[in-house]
Image (cartoon, grey):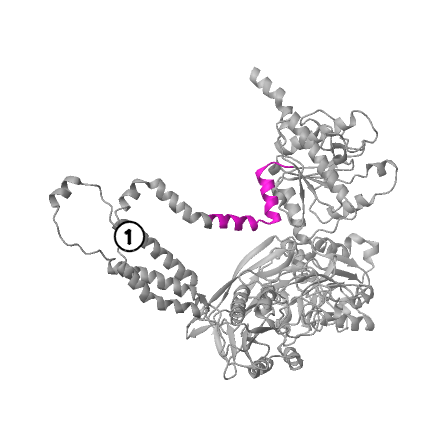
Amino acid sequence: MLSLGALAFATPWALAALISLPVLWWLLRITPPQPRQVTFPPLRLLLLLQPKEETPAHTPWWLLLLRLLIAALAILALAEPILNPQVAQRDSQALVLVIDDGWTGAPRWREKLVRADTLLEAAERDGRPAVLITTAAPANGEAMQPSLLMPAADLRPIVAGLQPKAWTSDRAALVQALLQARLPESANVVWISDGLREDETGASTYTLAEFLQRLGPLSVITSPDDATLALLPPVTSAQGDTVTLRRSANVTGEQGATLRAVTDQGRVLSRERMTFAARSETATLKLDLPSELRNQLSRLEIEEQPSAGTVQLLDDRWRRRPVGLVTGGAVETRQPLLGDLFYLDRALSPYAELRSAPVAELLQREIAVIVLADVAQVVASETRQLEQWIDNGGVLLRFAGPRMAEATDNLLPVKLRQGSRQLGGALSWSQPQRLGATPETSPFFGLGGSNDVTVSRQVLAEPEAQLGEKTWLRLEDGTPLATATQRGKGWLILVHTTANTLWSDLALSGFYVEMLRKVIDLSQGIGGTGEAADTPLPPLGVLDGFGRAVEPGPAVQPIAPRAIATTKPGPRHPPGWYGRLDSRQSLNTANAETKLLPVLNWPAGVAELRLDGQNRELHLLPWLMGAALLLFLADWLIGLGLRGLLLALRRRPAAAMLAVALLLLPGMTEAQQQRRTTLTANDEFALKASLDLRLAYVVTGQADIDQMSRAGLYGLTEVLYRRTSIEAAEPIGVNLEADDISLVPFLYWPITPQQPQLSDAALRRLDLFMKTGGMILFDTRDQAMGLSGTAASPNTEKLRQLLSRLDIPPLMPVPDDHVLTKAFYLMQDFPGRYSGGTLWVERNPGGDKDGVTSIVIGSHDFAAAWAIDNNGRPLAVTVPNLPRQREFAYRFGINLLVYTMTGNYKADQVHVPALLERLGN
């Protein structure tokens, strides 16, 4: 390579052809142009005929310059000029390429890989070897180490396949690994960095930079104008749920981002805009969702910057929480309708999982809130367990009562006076008190329905300096009705009246329900002291560096429940879901302590480059060749004009178009070949399914079953063609994990026990297919086992397992007046290879699907009854082998497909008598 500052030539020897330009000038100068063609004018020639000396004509000077320019452009293009070449200071040195592949490197990842590939291409051009170093721990859990020194061409596909990790870079561990590795003694080092340091000091970042400088000149490529974002865990407080988004401090202007609240099924519940003020590192948002939607929420994410750090997984602690109920009164057994538990159960059961048991038993299980109704004294051992449980995030809610009036334990937010205040007592009022104004700092602020609540008796709090801060509800006279204090991560709350109607009518109001719901919302999580807390939580699903859900790798290990809150994500414990499907906990990349600190000053001697396009290598060959080609076309047209052929070309436009077509044909043919070669299997399936009507079957992976399914649908297609107007092409197999099933109207699914579990994406496609007009015929093919009286077959068990993960509507056996009984043929039985059994359909199909069921379930092995070979002969014997059974199987298939294609129009026959009567009138 020949480098001339900002311009370099990959093939400099081609520039030697520039020496031939003077020779080319001389040749063009002495070569006369071709004679001009004009229409023959004999008489005018005779008049103007004069004997004179003529000199040969020369090519015009401006045309000479044009042709020399064409030649010069072609020569320069062959020399492969490069603008801003990525050449090293010394071309003989190896290239050491360092890439930050932690989650903070995910923004603009594709541009970073393009830049890395450009560097490797330059090294390949110079014949220099290269080494790749990544700063995040490998996903396989092995020790960090650089790649081997290899040709740059071999390293390019490795770099192209890099993906960011879901955990942070570990530069300190990388330095230790590099000290033990064999690296080139002299190299050019390029570090594509995220521009951030790990901590306040940035010691490991600067240590790594200084180590790399020992190998040779170091260039650092960053994107200083882009902010890295981190979504912090939402905080639940008395005022609601607050979401905080943090950004790196290298950007100080106003900036916006979009927060999405998503369910497990991928449904977006909310999209809210978050805005950073100027010079602010955080943006906050109050997440206001109804409780019903809040319980469905499982994921918060930032749209503009997908990464593991901009995703927060919300586990079961965010959803419907377990609440324990404990009472100290005997009235629960003698008069249950008057007891505290009756009112608590009615108020909380729609919104929480209720458990009624003694305190000791509740603490042995996962519990978020414990309600003590008129429990005066808690034993010492249970008190210590409750205090530990509250410190870990539990919420203890206590209601007063006759026994509470004499309570002396420490599980109270305020100190109580002995005795109680009641209507007509020593500490009395003349009439029942109503609720006063609710403090704005109280979680009960703004709740409706409190105007009608009256209180006739309460327990009083001893005056203290913090009593006002602890008061959440007051009576009209200012005395507290609800007090609370925070202990550790949990809350201790006391309602100074009863949970039933003995002292007030609070339990009869809607305010009572909303108040309890607010208390449940305060719980920070599920804490327990039982054996379940020591059972490791296996990984269910993890996140990749872009925040996408992926399957756990072999290196992922379970996490102890007690340690999940303090576990730092890494290869052994990546962020994601851990536990069981019915009780899972989340591990997130970003936490409340996450900080995004930019590198303020790199060590002396480090060259800082930008990722945003400046200093990017640009190949000029296609531009120069394109310019030369355009000038060549211009020279051709000028030559035609000088020879008088341009007018003739205008008279023959067809010839001109043919010439242009011949010039463009090779490029068009090449483009068509490229399109044909890039057609994937999914594209071929989409073309087949969209260009022709086809019946489809699910590919199970078992060759005999798949062949029978194909032959069965082939036989049904032939019968449909002969007997109806439905003209379908050959059936196709469907891969549920890859193919777009929305392109087919009907799907036959033979159930097999060996079929693998479907991914969440495939389940979502199936659910959408059934909800948007598609029909699935599930066939367990086990009617023969049902006739023998055995238990449920493996096929049926597999079907139950599958349907449990889908949103299946209520089903019923096909009624006598169903459209399937009269869509084309009149029939009441629906046999396949086997007769008998029950055919199940949707109970109440929606009107948006014209009343057509989206699911049909049978056990008759329909495909075997329909299947024929290439000669039209049946492939399977019906059971029992009756002459008409296969015919009725075909008729059922025809009815099913006509019903699928045409909808529920046959049901309109019930209106025929009324229409005829109206016409007669």
Q: Nearer the viewer, residue 702 or 530?
A: 702
Using a 10 Å C-alpha cutoff, classify the residue at mark 1 as few (fewer than 14 neighbours), some (14 to 19) or many (20 or more). Answer: some
Q: Is residue 688 magenta?
A: yes
Callout 1: helix, strand or loop? helix
- Image vertical order of residue 854 relative to residue 315, above or below: above
Find residue 304 and report its horizontal and vertical position in percent: 53, 61
Q: Nearer the viewer, residue 904 or 461?
A: 904
Q: Which residue is identified by label 1?
A: 638
On screen, residue 333 versus residue 398, left or right, reads: right
Amino acid type of the residue tagged 1 in the rendering? Ile
Occupied quadrant, residue 408: bottom right
Q: Residue at x 79, y 71 (%)?
A: 385
Q: Nearer the viewer, residue 776 or 127?
A: 127
Find residue 173 and report its horizontal and vertical position in percent: 65, 78
Chief SS of the magenta region: helix
Residue 496 seen anywhere in this rendered image of the structure = yes
> Which residues lie in the magenta part?
668-694
- Image vertical order of residue 436 relative to residue 799, above or below: below
Residue 449 seen anywhere in this rendered image of the structure = no
